Amino acid sequence: MKVIHFLNELKFSGAEIMYVDAAPVFQKLGCELFVVNTARQMGEYTPSFKDAGYKIIHKFIPNTLGAQWKMRKELIRMIKDGGYDVVHIHRSDLRWILSYCAWKAGCKSVYTAHNVFRSHWYSYPLHYFYRWTAKHIFNCKFQSISDSVYNNELNYYHIRTILVYNWYGKNRFSPAKDGEKDMCRKKLKIDKDALVVISVGGCSCVKRHEDVLYAMTEIVKCYPKAVYLHLGEGTALDNEKALAKKLGIEQNVRFCGNIKKVREYLIASDIYVMPSKFEGISITTIEAMACRIPAVLYNVPGLRDFNKETECSVLIAEDFHLLAKSVMELYEDKNRQKQLTDNAEIFVNGKFDMDKNVKKIYDLYRL
């Protein structure tokens, strides 16, 4: 089975990491894998796709439907000539044109809804129309990655999707062994007794890392040696660095950039935080929970999912004062930490198992 994935720029982020991790499982099931980088520039994660066995294609596709429509014959020919069995669409603004082109080429298509985006009131009818025609005329199968995304597509756009949960690289994320936390801290030059807070994710207004920075101003008053490990890059990074300096906490914040060996930073940490405005489902939160790092999350779509079945995190209102208070209280309460991490480890290993969920995606390809 020849499967071609259409992504944006191949960056070091959730969906890309997930499908690179899963490549051996798909290949074992008989999939020949291709990926299209549809942005103008190739992303920094391209070599990882190549190493995983994907054949890389660079095809810039603009983000306006008019420009996309002009490319339709070229895209149909590309799909036909490639002999692909499945076109897997990950970029939401390509959902309609690629499902149309796959339909014209006699090829199956799958669209994955990765987030809980909502339309403006004036564009809603058009976005509803695109979804309805893609699904009911072009026979595109819609897949959602979490309960929040499923409910958003169903209740807001009135589209019933097939729910297949995301997965994480279990071979890369696991709890610390005896003495490993101290070893990781020594390697990272972090004081053994410091309170260490970590966030992992791209820098954007959606991630709201500034709330962690504001929270750190309160945390360092009680824990002067506290460290915030900030993993990730993005358009808001320079503003976040400037804010840390303005708040006078730059010595307590480490802007680490994109890190491949995320686990050793997680293992070195005490509390994982995510103050996003919304998520589809957070892969980095899954990874932190798999490493048994207690989590404090904002109570928003895609993060509240982690507490749907049992309490796996401290789920709080969107307020940086409360974020600081919750981090310090959880840090002091070892029994609460154990209860949360016990629940979370069971939850993520059962819900986000790679072999199980990749098989469900494969079965979706075969429908």
Image (cartoon, rainbow, N blue to C red):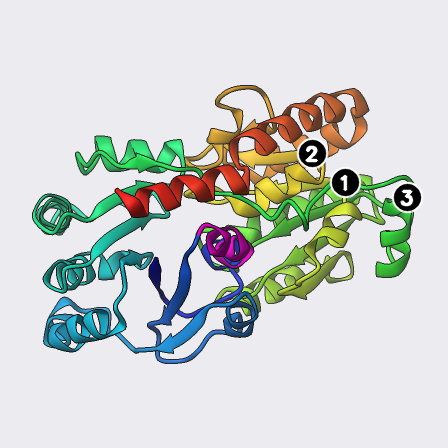
Q: Disc 3 marks which amino acid? A: Asp
Magenta residue span: 19-29
Q: Disc 1 marks which amino acid? A: Asp
Residue underneath mark 3: 193
Chief secondary structure of the magenta span?
Answer: helix
* Residue 180 point in image, percent of width and height: 87, 46
Residue at position x 48%, y 30% in the image = 304
Residue at position x 81%, y 41% in the image = 176
Q: Residues within 10 Å of mark 2 (few under 14, many from 20)?
A: many
Residue underneath mark 1: 270
Q: Disc 2 marks which amino acid? A: Pro
Residue underneath mark 2: 294
Residue at position x 19%, y 49% in the image = 140
- Confirm whether the magenta stretch covers residue 22: yes
Q: Is residue 301 above or below residue 193?
A: above
- Label 1, label 2: how many angstroms apart (C-alpha)? 7 Å
Residues at circles 1 and 2 in contact by the CB criterion of under 8 Å: yes
- Label 2, label 3: how many angstroms apart (C-alpha)? 17 Å
Query: For the image shown, how many numbered marks are present on the structure?
Result: 3
Q: Is residue 26 left or right of residue 108?
A: right
Residues at circles 2 and 3 in contact by the CB criterion of under 8 Å: no
